[in-house]
Image (cartoon, rainbow, N blue to C red):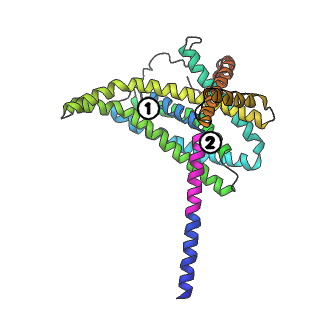
Amino acid sequence: MSGLLALLDDVAAIAKVAAASVDDVIGQAAKAGAKAAGAMIDDAAVTPKYVHGFSADRELPIIWRIARGSMINKLLFLLPAGLALNHFAPWAIAPLLMLGGAYLCFEGAEKIAHSLGWISHHVETGGEPIIDDPAHLEEERAQGAIKTDFILSAEIMTIALAAIPKTGFWMEAATLAAVAVMITVAVYGAVALIVKADDLGLHMAQTGRFSVTRQFGRALVRAMPKFLWGLTVVGTAAMLWVGGSIILHALHTLGLHGPSDFVKEWAVWLASSLGGPLNLLSWAFTALMDGVFGFLLGLLLVPPGLKLVTPLWKRLTGSKA
């Protein structure tokens, strides 16, 4: 009996350790995922366009195909590559992180410059494609979305990897895998809700039994274009903020302390001048200045990005966008 009790105690101890490890993985994954907020919001804002023009019954299957491709991108390709770099070439993480930050700055600044009419958009649609086979068009759209997702997923995984503390290979692998799953579910779950919200609103407006239900449905349909516009604005701001902060932090790590110290000192001074909660205001001003830095850097990157990088990417992928 005493042997059985000792065995049960050992099992309980192992279970506690396992539960603690799971909690650590989830906690670290949540913190690392928060660092990638800019790319996540951009991903959620970009994806709905890939189901535009399809019948309502094909929207969710297309989103599922893109989500599955995103999961494959993260778990089968980017996760092993990230872990290999982290353990065999850790010096490459900072340059890759800066590259991802620069891409976020470029994308955010390019969107703002286009909306202000400073540049023509780099996406050449050539009008709606005339394709007799809807299945072929669906396949083309899904593959294009998965290719785009690979870039955004690479940014997300690199940012998350840099935010994960050194805890051993398997803990890092589990945390990064948790990040991949959590972000994919969050992004494409949100995309599914966004895409089907207008259908739900239309259904409520047409078949609702109560007047308030029908009014809510009509309001939901009217609100979705504004919501999508707002999501794009928030995503653009988040990209500039995250991209700028990544670049400033990387420069600080490489020994160039001036830019990040300047931002921190001015953020504290502004927060102190206004009074109120110092930590909150310092964070807000730091984020604002990071975003301004990201925007200015992005503007510098727009000309080479549009004239060199975008044509090269089109040539390599065969993409029109």
Q: Which stretch is magenta?
A: 19-34
- At horizontal 38% and vertical 29% (from top left) the residue drawn is 54
Most foreground residue, 99 or 8:
8
Q: Does the magenta stretch include residue 310?
A: no
Number of marks in the rendered image: 2
Q: In this view, does 54 lie above or below 121?
A: below
Most foreground residue, 110 or 49:
110
Q: Name the residue under label 2.
A: 157
Does residue 122 appear anywhere in the picture? Answer: no
Helix, strand or loop under label 1:
helix
Helix, strand or loop under label 2:
helix
- At horizontal 61% and vertical 40% (from top left) the residue drawn is 35
Task: Kindly check if marks 2 and 1 are in contact, taking CB atoms under 8 A apart as contact.
Answer: no
Dividing the picture into quarters, in which one does residue 320 lie? Answer: top right
Q: In this view, does 17 lie above or below 262?
A: below
User: Residue 231 location, x and y as percent?
Assistant: 47, 28
The numbered mark, 2 or 1, whose residue comes first in the sequence reads: 1
Nearest to viewer (mark 2 / mark 1) = 2
User: Residue 146 location, x and y as percent?
Assistant: 53, 35
Most foreground residue, 292 or 138:
292
Q: Mark 1 points at which residue?
A: 138
Q: Badge 2: how crowded within 10 Å, few (<14), some, or many (20+)?
A: many
Q: Is residue 26 magenta?
A: yes
Instruction: Identify the main secondary structure in magenta.
Output: helix
Query: Which numbered tag is attached to residue 297?
Result: none
User: Residue 33 location, x and y as percent?
Assistant: 57, 43
Classify the position of the C terminus by image quarter.
Answer: top right
Dividing the picture into quarters, in which one does residue 222 lie? Answer: top left
